Amino acid sequence: MTQYTFCEIAEGRLKPDATVFENESVIAFFDRGAIAPYHTLVVPKRHSTNIFDVNEDDLVEVTRAIRKLCLVYKEQLGINNVQIISSNGAEAQQDAFHLHFHIVPRSKGDGQDIQWKPDPTLPGRFQELLSHLKPM
């Protein structure tokens, strides 16, 4: 976001072009860099950089808002396919360092295909990978 920052929006110092939903914890608005109609950003008002430092209550509120918006889009607009996207960390292509989630409506032939490149060696390494994790 080059025109304004999520923090300024969350603090009420800047108004998004089109606010879709807002409560005391969350604001959701159309993305200026939208790749589809109704492409929405959902942002907690309390600052956190990413998923690694977000307050758990804020994350719950963001998740509730995402679900609510998706249901509204389905019921009112007939949008039955969405991607929920959040990049966390510079190497994960995060470019706005205030936690946010994209709701991206999808439709067949929209040209926005994410190309996964599966690593065929990983399934054979699952037990090794698990051995590096402590029980949770």
Image (cartoon, grey):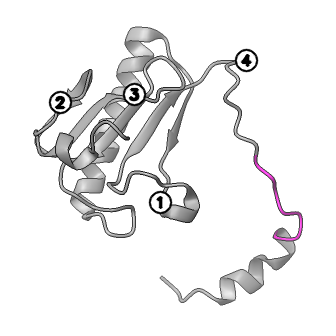
Crowding at mark 4 (Cα within 10 Å: few <14, some 14-19, many 20+): few
Q: Position of residue 109 (x, y in %)?
A: 73, 17
Q: Secondary structure at mark 1?
A: loop
Give the label, 2 or 1, closer to the camera.
Answer: 2
Name the residue type under label 2.
Lys
State the residue lying farthest toward the top: 77
User: Bounds of the magenta span?
Assistant: 116-122
Sequence order check, earlier mark of 2 and 1: 2
Task: Read off the residue under disc 3.
Answer: 32
Q: Position of residue 83 (x, y in %)?
A: 55, 35
Q: Position of residue 93 (x, y in %)?
A: 55, 55
Left or right? Give the position of 74 relative to 132. left
Residues marked 3 and 4 touching at CB (< 8 Å):
no
Crowding at mark 1 (Cα within 10 Å: few <14, some 14-19, many 20+): some
Q: What residue sits 81% from the left and 78% below the top? A: 125
Q: Secondary structure at mark 2?
A: loop
Q: Which mark is residue 88?
A: 1
Sequence order check, earlier mark of 2 and 4: 2
Crowding at mark 2 (Cα within 10 Å: few <14, some 14-19, many 20+): few
Q: Is residue 98 magenta?
A: no
Name the residue type under label 3.
Arg
Q: Secondary structure at mark 4?
A: loop
Q: Which mark is residue 15?
A: 2
Task: Read off the residue under disc 4.
Answer: 109
Give the label, 2 or 4, closer to the camera.
Answer: 2
